Amino acid sequence: MNLLPEITLSPIGVIRSPFITPDNMPIQPVGDMAASGSVEVLPQYVEGLKDLEGFSHVILIYFFHLAGPTRLKVRPFLDVQERGVFATRAPVRPNSIGISVVEVERIHGCYIDLKKVDVLDGTPLLDIKPFVPDFDVPKGAVLTGWMGEVSEKAIHKRADDRFARKMPD
């Protein structure tokens, strides 16, 4: 007997970027190829953007709409060893939800112009949260696990299609 409720999410907007496919896309916003982009919020949610202009960064929560099927073990972009998906940022997760911390350049109307975007164009946006260093970077937090040894590689690392949904021929 499953006591968990069914969850239904609807996009609040769409993320725009120059990245049409995962090939050669940065794997994190810190990547040196991360690009300018934008968020277009649906009209019924624009009022929710009020007061967001005071934040330098936002957390985008989105749906990996082109991710392949769920895999519980993956070989992440930053490693050659297979890892559990929950110890990675791979998109082939049970719920295909992604996050990115991006810099806000300007808010106008239903648009948020962004810097350092690492998301595919047309990605459905589920939510926006302000990035607050005092809340989002806990005191005493340190890199742990396998990523502590390889995180500096993210600046130059590019994505490939290893996690993309395979389209029929």
Image (tube, rainbow, N blue to C red):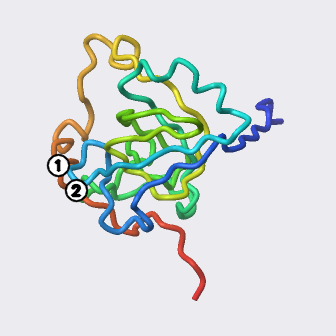
Circle 1 SS class: helix
Which sits in the foreground, 90 or 35? Answer: 35
Q: Which mark is residue 168?
A: none
How many other residues sit within 10 Å of disc 2, few (<14), some (14-19) or many (≥20)?
Answer: some
> What residue is shown with label 1?
153
Q: Which mark is residue 157?
A: 2
In the displayed structure image, the side of residue 96 where residue 31 appears, left or right: left
Circle 2 SS class: loop
Residue 29 image position (x, y, % from top left): 31, 43
Which sits in the foreground, 76 or 73? Answer: 76
Residue at x-position 50% and y-position 55%: 92
Q: How many marks on residues?
A: 2
Residue at x-position 67% and y-position 44%: 11
Going by the numbered disc 1, the residue's amino acid type is Lys
Residue at x-position 53% and y-position 38%: 61
Residue 79 image position (x, y, % from top left): 24, 54
Name the quadrant containing residue 138: top left
Tell me the quarter of the image containing the C terminus.
bottom right
- Identify the residue at the far front of this view: 108
Which sits in the foreground, 120 or 44? Answer: 44
Q: Are marks 2 and 1 in contact (CB under 8 Å)?
A: yes
Residue at x-position 35% and y-position 11%: 134
- Identify the residue at the far right of this view: 1
Name the quadrant containing residue 109: top right
Going by the numbered disc 2, the residue's amino acid type is Lys
How many other residues sit within 10 Å of disc 1, few (<14), some (14-19) or many (≥20)?
Answer: some
Q: What distance separates the C-alpha of mark 2 from that of mark 1? A: 6 Å
Which sits in the foreground, 94 or 21? Answer: 21
Residue 104 image position (x, y, % from top left): 39, 33
Tell me the quarter of the image containing the N terminus.
top right
